[in-house]
Image: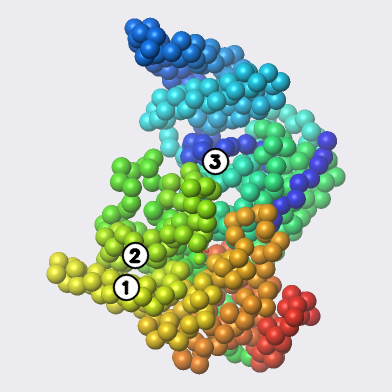
Amino acid sequence: MTFSIHGLPVARGIAIGRAVLVVSSRIDVAHYFIKPEEVEAEIDRVRVARNGVAEELQKLQASVALMGPNDAPHELSALLDVHQMLLQDEVLTTGVKHWIVERLYNAEWALTTQLEIVARQFDEMEDEYLRERKADLEQVVERLLHRMKGTAAVLAPPPPKRKRAAEHHDEDHADPTASEAFDAPLVLIAHDLSPADMLQFKKSVFAGFVTDVGGRTSHTAIVARSMDIPAVVGARSVSQLVRQDDWVIIDGDAGVVIVDPSPIILAEYGFKQRQGDLERGRLSRLRHKPAVTLDGQRVELLANIEMPEDTLGAVKAGAVGVGLFRSEFLFMGRESQSKTRLPDEEEQYEAYRRAVDGMQGMPVTIRTVDVGADKPLDGKAVRDDAHLNPALGLRAIRWSLADPAMFLTQLRAILRAAAHGEIHLLIPMLAHVSEIRQTLSLIDFARAELDNRGVAYGHVKVGAMIEIPAAALTLRTFLKYFDFLSIGTNDLIQYTLAIDRADESVAHLYDPTHPAVLRLVADTIAECRRQGKGVSVCGEMAGDVVFTRLLLGLGLRSFSMHPSQILAVKQEVLRADVSKLEAWAREVVDAEDPAAALAR
Ligand code: PEP
Ligand code: MG
């Protein structure tokens, strides 16, 4: 039966595919397709792991038997029996085999897919004792996954080009044949995904994703936008309502998820999908066109990136530089790959240098680390209850100043990379003049350290993000100390309106057109222009074509956004006549209901 679920649109386009349910804690499990000739070997990897775990459990049993009743309660032995039973469970073993043979999933993926199916069956059990066995099953699977580490023949090769559902599957969507099912794109359904999960996701095979929680400018949504795949967040109970392998349409423009679509709906969305592709093709012709308005105003369109490799997409989209390199993504989700918790100076230097090289002589703005709030380092504590208001806590520059050695390491790495190309250094979340002074003296200190070591470094312009109302209201102080400012509208909206940007339950109140927000943005642009200082917007507003004319009218000439948004914004720029927008933009800012004025 077809039904739809509404959420928040975060990344444009339509994805049609089969649902893969994944829990956040297991998203770091590799998802890739094996070759048909690797099926036997993959099944063997599971068998070897299962034998290994069985032996492990037997040894545990034996040691428990040797303990006295005071050291090992009777329940422990019973529990190990249950784990042995679950390990050999028919549903688990045949299910895993099915995903490997029929769909060519790698073993880990097959295992977690089957785990989701069986776990749901446990959830639906009436008997409480049986229901609670789900946790045991999860532990058994964790043991298997642990055993399989390092035994994979390949590490996530690039996904094969997959057909679209509508291309091969427009008649009989409810019961596709095995070969059609194998060919179908896959969409990921999860309760939540942390930004660190998203880094894994970037390397995987999925054509789109949906989560129960999250707001439009949560960092998970931001990474989705950077990947340019359709996504919906805040879809409440989607992970409960969708079953493994269901056909799903993700409408990233409208924020709607359609489950088990009828042939008519499928055909309609297939058509929409093709229209989107045509529009993208049309826009790509603007790539080499300079972004100049009808009345001759030059506009700088820059890219927001998370990883040095993203510069490839930035250059391809025609960006004239990087306006925001969110360096914290180098610091996230590292435990599984690296022994050290944080990247050292050398590793960071190499990464920043790669970004500089990738931009081929164009400037790169590197923002110092901004972890905390909805960007935990390990991706586990997406909502950390230990900190009641993580968005108001030890985040961004506060985190850096609390650990000067870590901060100096990053500063030295950035300064060294600046010897290879133009780098602008951007500081997030400043509010106090004391923080400004401390930051600038640490930058001086980093330079002095490099001098003492005799290491080459380059000149950097230093800028501040304006993302706390306190900063926007003390611009003169900021302009006294900094070479340029960059407006982070995502946080500026969050902190002006007291709306957690990652919380879907208040997402309807997260309003970029609130008069208070627009006033702060307008004043910041105007003051920078008056003082002849560079100013840019690097929050999501910069990439939203709804706001392009307004921001141009307010005097903005530098926009930084995901590469996937650059061409659409450029099209707006090319159609704009700024001389006619200025008075209108002031009216919008002064209106009681700017959203209505904006639409006029
Ligand atoms: C912002 O706050 O607008 C911004 C660009 O920074 P981030 O989204 O990384 O907090
Ligand atoms: Mg911010």
Badge number at residue 401: 2
- The image quadrant where one finds the C terminus is bottom right
Regarding mark 2 in the picture, which secondary structure is present there? helix
Three-letter amino acid code of the residue under disc 1: Gln
Q: Quadrant of the N terminus?
A: top right
**Under 8 Å from ligand 2: the CB of mark 2?**
no
- Position of residue 287 in the picture relative to residue 56 (left or right): right
The image position of residue 587, as x and y in percent, is 72, 87
Q: CA distance from mark 1 to mark 3?
A: 38 Å
Percent coordinates x, y for residue 149 in the rendering: 40, 30
- Residue 555 appears left or right of 149: right
The crowd level at tag 3 (other Cα within 10 Å; few <14, some 14-19, many 20+) is: many
The residue at the far front in this view is 70
Which mark, by number, is residue 24? Answer: 3
Q: What sort of colour scheme is used for the picture?
A: rainbow
Residue 183 place in picture, x, y as percent: 65, 36
Going from the N terminus, do you reach mark 3 or mark 2 first? 3
Amino acid, disc 2 = Leu
Measure the C-alpha gap from mark 1 to mark 2.
Answer: 8 Å
Vertical order, 21 against 343 (above or below) = above
- Residue located at (55% from left, 88% from top): 526
Mark 1 touching mark 2, by CB under 8 A? yes
Q: CA distance from mark 3 to mark 2?
A: 31 Å
In the displayed structure, 558 sits above or below 31; it is below
